[in-house]
Image (tube, rainbow, N blue to C red):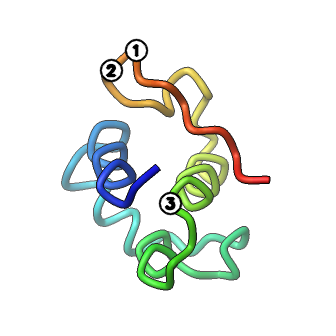
Amino acid sequence: MRNREFWQLVDEVFGAQYGRTLAGDQYLTELDNRTAAQAIDDGVDPRVVWHALCDALDVPDAKRWGIDKYRQAPPRAR
């Protein structure tokens, strides 16, 4: 997953306005108490950040991949 894809999913899953605010304000323990935006800026793999954000907000797997029902879900980092 690239940064561009991360932000596209944020917009699709949470809404453009709310998603960007959420990514900048929601501190995630899974990311060492950083926000998603801070973690992305710090170079954390976007798919790790995406899964941490979705896990924290209890987003079901079926809803994590945005509006494209054919988009392949990025696996969790090992």
Task: Provide residue 38's location: percent of width, then percent of height.
Answer: 46, 81
Q: Residue 15: horizontal and vertical position, in percent?
A: 26, 43
> Which SS class for mark 2?
loop
Which residue is pictured at 71% across the width and 73% down the height? 29
The numbered disc on residue 57 is none
50 shown above or below 25: above
Q: Residues within 10 Å of mark 3 (few under 14, many from 20)?
A: many
Sequence-wise, the earlier of marks 3 and 1 is: 3
State whether residue 62 is above or below residue 58.
above
Q: Is residue 66 above or below residue 29?
A: above
Please tell me which residue is depicted at 29% across the width and 37% down the height of the picture: 12
Disc 1 packing (10 Å; few <14; some 14–19; many ≥20): few
Q: Which residue is mark 2?
A: 68
Task: For mark 1, give the secondary structure.
Answer: loop
Near mark 2 (Cα within 10 A), the count class, few <14, some 14-19 or many ≥20, is: few
Q: Position of residue 28 (x, y in %)?
A: 62, 70
Label 1, label 2: how far apart the Cα atoms are: 5 Å
Q: Amino acid at mark 2?
A: Asp
Q: Amino acid at mark 1?
A: Tyr
Give the residue type that dot 3 points to: Pro
Q: Are marks 1 and 2 in contact (CB under 8 Å)?
A: yes
| Residue under numbered circle 1 | 70
Residue lying at the far left of the rendered structure: 17
Question: Toward the viewer: 27 or 47?
Answer: 47
Q: Residue furthest right?
A: 78
- Within the image, what quadrant is residue 70 found in? top left
Residue at 29%, 55% (x, y): give it: 4
Q: In the rendered image, which residue does mark 3 sit on? A: 46
Q: Is residue 46 left or right of residue 8?
A: right
Label 3: state its secondary structure.
helix
How far apart are the two marked residues, 3 and 1, measured between alpha carbons? 20 Å
Q: Earlier in the sequence, mark 3 or mark 2?
A: 3
